[in-house]
Image (tube, rainbow, N blue to C red):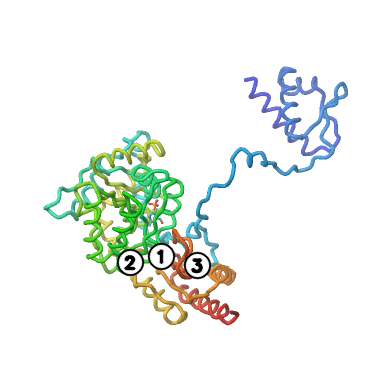
Amino acid sequence: MYDDSSSRIVVGLKGWIDGAAPGARLPSTRTLVAEYGASPVTVQKALRTLTEQGLVETRTGVGTFVRAARVNRPNDYGWQTAALGALPSQPPRSVALRDAPADTIALHSGYPDRELLPERLVRAAFARAARSDAVIGRPPAAGLPELQSWFAGELAAATPSTIVAPTAGDVIVLPGSQSGLTAAFRALAGPGRPLLIESPTYWGAILAAAQAGVHLVPIPTGLDGPDPDEVDRAFDRTGARAFYAQPRFANPTGTSWAPRVVDGVLDILRERGAFLIEDDWAHDLGIDADPAPLAARDDAGHIVYVRSLTKSVSPAVRVAAIIARGPARDRVLADVEAHTMYVSGVLQTVARDVITQPAWRTHLRGVRHQLAGRRDLLMDALRAHVPGAHLHAVPAGGLNIWVRLPDGTDLPRLVRECENAGVLVAGGDGWFPAEPTAPYLRLNFAGPNPGAFPDGVRILGRTLETLAGAR
Ligand SMILES: Cc1ncc(COP(=O)(O)O)c(C=O)c1O
């Protein structure tokens, strides 16, 4: 009551001050007491607040006045420098998260265009969820049992009959797989401990590793994936016990591991008693291929499988899961509980609704065709208009093409000048956990307005030529 009326007076007087000349005298305390029906103590408290905010000054025995020099003082947060200490070294924020103004050709973003999402299914699922108890209840920390079952069932369907399939109890539902990566890095490696990682790799994994304080050990990855001998040597040399990788449709290279790499890495994990954190971010985004996740071949708990629905159901729903077995699962869950506690039951209900509709499968088949058309359009445009570019691979899935540019290309300048010309592209440097080995671009074919891709690539080609001419 007391505080409420004091804030009411503050708000009222602020309006008065806005219309008053600097130096004007405020109504007396007695007038304010009468006007606001408040006690003199409450009025004094309001005046103190206005003084602290630099809006008025009080001259004892004379009255309260609108401050003559009502300068907009710049905020001074300098004290925070001492309180926070030196900036922790952390990768810069990725361009992949940048919003694109409407008139640009966006080849930079990692997120699918609206036409690639099951919008009708998502809207209908939200309408149904709104009428359900999901809007009120608190789901269990590891997730809604029926959604856990769905994730376990999906992996079980890819699991050969000789291997014990995962069950719902192995699943932890997450608010997006990014938080799952951080949780797995913390739980399975930990601060100061080594973690093997492909290079190049997803920038968000590099960021998550920095947050978790793990020490990254980059392993070069190529068209077939990493060389298993190299992986083995890195485990041996560093004493690492975990390897983060994207064996299917990797972001950024678009490649999938060859069967001999899959076999080799599985053997190494068993021999060395190590974990693979398998990031299956593009599970639903296969185009010409649909290789089984490595996790389908493991029942001894070596693979911690991370599977996201963000880019197939909706970035607004953003539900994912980790499937892990044994004590590793409990450790990851403990970490998830400490950081996110549980995922909104509404989002889990909506995600499950969408992926269990018969129309979901039809939708995915349509997306496959659309992605194929978009990928081929972008590849053809690159071949025609950027002859100096080397296309790493024709991605059999995922959303992006990894393009190597001529050595000596000034990458930051190229990105800047393309943007000035209305085309957003992502320089590849952010995808390297160590020094970039060459200038690369990651171009996404899932962005808006694919009809403009050829124009965007023409601009890219011209800009590259101009920069080469200036060298
Ligand atoms: C390879 C990879 N892993 C994980 C993620 C995180 O996705 P989310 O947290 O939305 O599930 C992304 C997002 O771009 C990604 O590209």
Residue located 40% across and 69% down the image? 401
Location of ligand 1 given as a quarter of the image:
bottom left
Residue named by callout 3: 425
Q: Are marks 2 and 1 in contact (CB under 8 Å)?
A: no
Q: Quadrant of residue 46?
A: top right
Residue 452 at x, y percent in the picture: 47, 73
Left or right, 422 with respect to 327, comes to: right
Residue named by callout 2: 255
Which tag is nearer the camera, tag 2 or tag 3?
2
Q: Amino acid at mark 2?
A: Thr
Q: CA distance from mark 1 to mark 3?
A: 13 Å
Residue located 29% across and 48% down the image? 353
Sequence order check, earlier mark of 2 and 1 = 2
Left or right, 30 with respect to 124, comes to: right
Q: State the residue lying farthest toward the left.
A: 162
Disc 1 packing (10 Å; few <14; some 14–19; many ≥20)? many
Sequence order check, earlier mark of 1 and 3 = 3
